[in-house]
Amino acid sequence: MGEASHPLGAGTLEVRAVRGPEVAVARALAGAAFADRDPRPSPVPTGPVPAPGPGEPGALHWVAVEDGAVVASAAARPRGQWFGGRRLPVVTLGGVAVEVTHRGRGVGRELVGGLFAAARDAGAVACVLFPSTHRFYASLGCGAGGRRPVFALSTEELRQRLPRPRGDAVLRFAEPRDAAAVAALSAGRAARGQGFVDHDGLPGSPPEDPAGPGAFVVETAGVVTGWCLLHRKPATRAGAAYDLEVADLVAADADSELALWRGLVADTPQALRADAVVPAGSLLERRLERLQAPVENATWMLRLLDVDAALTARGWPAGVTAEVVLDVTDPLRPGDDGPRRLHVAGGRATVEPAPGAAADVAVGPGVLASLFTGHLDPVQAAHDGLLDARVDAAAVLRTLFAGPPAVLARAF
């Protein structure tokens, strides 16, 4: 992974991995950027700067340094994201912050671009993020991947509408010994759905530890068949002691999911409201007669860091055989431009250069990312002028990228 220096304004901007004492400064900078307090960053520690420490395996923490001062910070964490029933190596991007006096000068663009390159060199095929500034990330080739629909649910309505499970599911607090079972449940859900990111346990806990405050499992005949993570937050309605936030919930079957929800709404009347992600077609959407507008519907974005590797790694519809010549123009990676032939058969894909071939579809990286997740319909996108494609080629892409809406169950 290389480092880069770029002239910017009066000084020289160096974009590279964080070093030793700079970690604390970078974290303070990110904290100030997203908190309601003095935005002035802490001074850079003086003295020699040691080489980067080991940190979290595979994690990338990059900074922009100008004249010896850390002026921007960003971090990416290696994860897996599922498309078409297959797990892709990706990174999740967070904590992108630029010191207030350096904004509007291209520092953030240089930093994130450098981090994208480092993540690709480390083997990630895509980067997932919740954008704070949609236009900024779109300019870097990110495309809308989907939404995270959080609804405010009445615990009393849940109690009335949801039937009791038919089996002998038992709700209990999660324990460290449940780690493997919870990971298997999450992987099964991810393989059935689209866009799910690997389960990572509780915030502040080791990734393999699903136990802690607010973590519950459902056990059926001695086997863990459901897990959820629950938080309490200040009440929004008079007469309630608190509201509930269902940070994540996964179950092997409908009975186990019902057992989890029946256990959660036992907090009524202390809690009158529960905020939870309700994907389209889910058990809750089918069981509840009416869902109001979501209280949160954040757009998440995807950046394909290696187009060919991402197309090859994902799963494709079984029984479909198709071939399309794509011409992807990526301003951050001009060396990768040019036609490539995407061939899909048996649920797998191959991608090969096709120099001189006439493109069936010409597209930029952001729109391709939105097609990749299934968030953007290719036929509608061609109609709207977002991609240049023949009608038949757009229809082929619609078949190839078909699937359930891509959902991120948990924020990061």
Image (cartoon, rainbow, N blue to C red):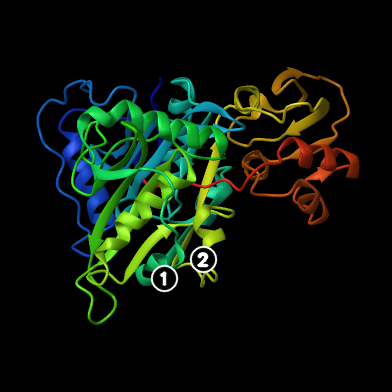
Badge 1: how crowded within 10 Å, few (<14), some, or many (20+)?
Answer: some
Residue position marked by numbered label 1 in the rendering? 157
* Quadrant housing the C terminus: top left
Q: Position of residue 255 (x, y in %)?
A: 44, 46
Residue 100 seen anywhere in this rendered image of the structure: no
Q: Secondary structure at mark 2?
A: loop
Who is closer to the viewer here, 360 or 17? 360
Residue 179 location (% of width, % of height): 29, 29
Q: Position of residue 135 (x, y in %)?
A: 54, 56
Residue 252 in view, yes or no: yes
Query: Depth check: 38 or 345 in front?
Result: 345
Quadrant in which the N terminus appears: top left
Residue 183's quadrant in the figure?
top left
Residue at screen point 68% across, 42% down: 371
For residue 298, above or below residue 107: below
Residue furthest to the left:
47
Mark 1–mark 2 Cα distance, whole angstroms, equals 8 Å
Disc 1 and disc 2 in contact, CB within 8 angstroms:
yes
Residue type marked 2: Leu
Which residue is depicted at the point 49% across and 57% down?
Answer: 278
Across and down, in percent, residue 199 comes to 38, 35
- Which label sits on residue 288? 2
Q: Amino acid at mark 1?
A: Glu
